[in-house]
Amino acid sequence: MVNAGSERQTVLILDDGHEDAVAALADDFPALQLVTQPTSQIRGIIAQAAQVDAALLDELPDLHAALKLGRSYTNFDMPALRRRGINFATVPRKGPNCVAELALTLILALSKDLVNGHEAVAMGAYRYRGLKPEITAERKIAFHWMHNTRVHEVVGKTLGIIGMGEIGCELARRASVLGMRSIYYKRSRLSPELEAAFDASYAPLNDVLSHSDYVCVAVPHTPETERMIGAPQLELMKPSAYLVNIARGGIIDEDALIDVLAENRIAGAGLDVFTFEPLPAESPLTALDNVILCPHIGGGTGTNRTIELRAGLEKMREMLA
């Protein structure tokens, strides 16, 4: 058994494709020996999508700590880790965090009809309502002078998440803090442990669509998900519901979405992605007042494997200290 206080402890980065990141970070973590292939005396293991099962653990008798890059640890055999008494932790990944932040931003902006409110204030729309600016005081304000019926609170609302991967899990965590109820659809249901961790309940796709006040699309764009949200699915949504898409434009039938938005068959949408990008200037979406459009900014300031692995190694260093 390797002494935990030895000079360098070996950490296995299990997923393929991290070789360049390991080389870039090796000098920043001198107390750790970073390897990408199993070797003797592994003290720590880091995995993003690679399977960490009982068979692998049996090959690593000196393992002390296991770390998931990301929060949804569906690829870890938790009973096997617990039987061995191996320390376990997760670290959020920057990429999913960025996208989840935008999804929540769109939900909150839609709940306050923020874009229309800004435009009304900026253009002085009070003039068309027989109002004039007056000096304010604690009890003297022009409260809600737009009388916008779309403004509401998200507390108590139901958020439906289509695709409960890392982005969906990060979004559910944030929604829970705001007092929202999260339901989700995923081809493979999460374990009860993970559902409790993310405060989310499984439901079939049609139920997610029909029961949610906000529906967020967060699945990869594959042949199976191409236009998975079309006219029949949109018709299931409540007239008061909003659709948020931070995944890929091709997952939604854009023409069908335009139709339901133009006819107010759903309340609105927040869209960061489109069938064609940038969104063509002649798109009917640009003329709708119940839509918030973004220039595909869900990735935030960007990320890469080196950034995300660095966060994992910092946590692993603490676990092995």
Image (cartoon, helix red, strand yellow):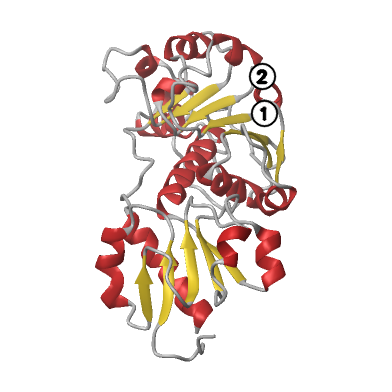
Three-letter amino acid code at the position of disc 1: Ser
Q: Is residue 139 among what the camera can see?
A: no
Q: Residue at x 48, y 42 (%)?
A: 105
The part of the image, by quadrant, that contains residue 197 is bottom right
Q: CA distance from mark 2 to mark 1?
A: 8 Å
Residue 198 location (% of width, % of height) = 65, 50
- What residue is disc 1 on? 212
* Mark number displayed over residue 77: none
- CB under 8 Å between discs 2 and 1: yes
Q: Secondary structure at mark 2?
A: loop
Q: Quadrant of the N terminus?
A: bottom right
Q: Nearer the viewer, residue 137 or 194?
A: 194
Q: Residue at x 50, y 48 (%)?
A: 136
Q: Earlier in the sequence, mark 2 or mark 1?
A: 1
Q: Is residue 211 among what the camera can see?
A: yes
Q: Secondary structure at mark 1?
A: loop
Q: Describe residue 181's horizontal placement relative to residue 125 as left or right.
A: right
- What residue is disc 2 on? 238
Neighbourhood count class around disc 1 (C-alpha, 10 Å): few under 14, some 14–19, many 20 upward: many
Q: Describe residue 139's horizontal placement relative to residue 105 as left or right.
A: right
Three-letter amino acid code at the position of disc 2: Lys
Residue 99 location (% of width, % of height) = 44, 43
Query: In the rendered image of this protein, does residue 243 appear above or below residue 314?
Result: above
Q: Nearer the viewer, residue 45 or 282?
A: 45
Residue 269 location (% of width, % of height) = 50, 25
Q: Residue at x 45, y 48 (%)?
A: 96
Q: Nearer the viewer, residue 191 or 8?
A: 8
Query: In the rendered image of this protein, does residue 217 appear above or below residue 140?
Result: above
Neighbourhood count class around disc 2 (C-alpha, 10 Å): few under 14, some 14–19, many 20 upward: some
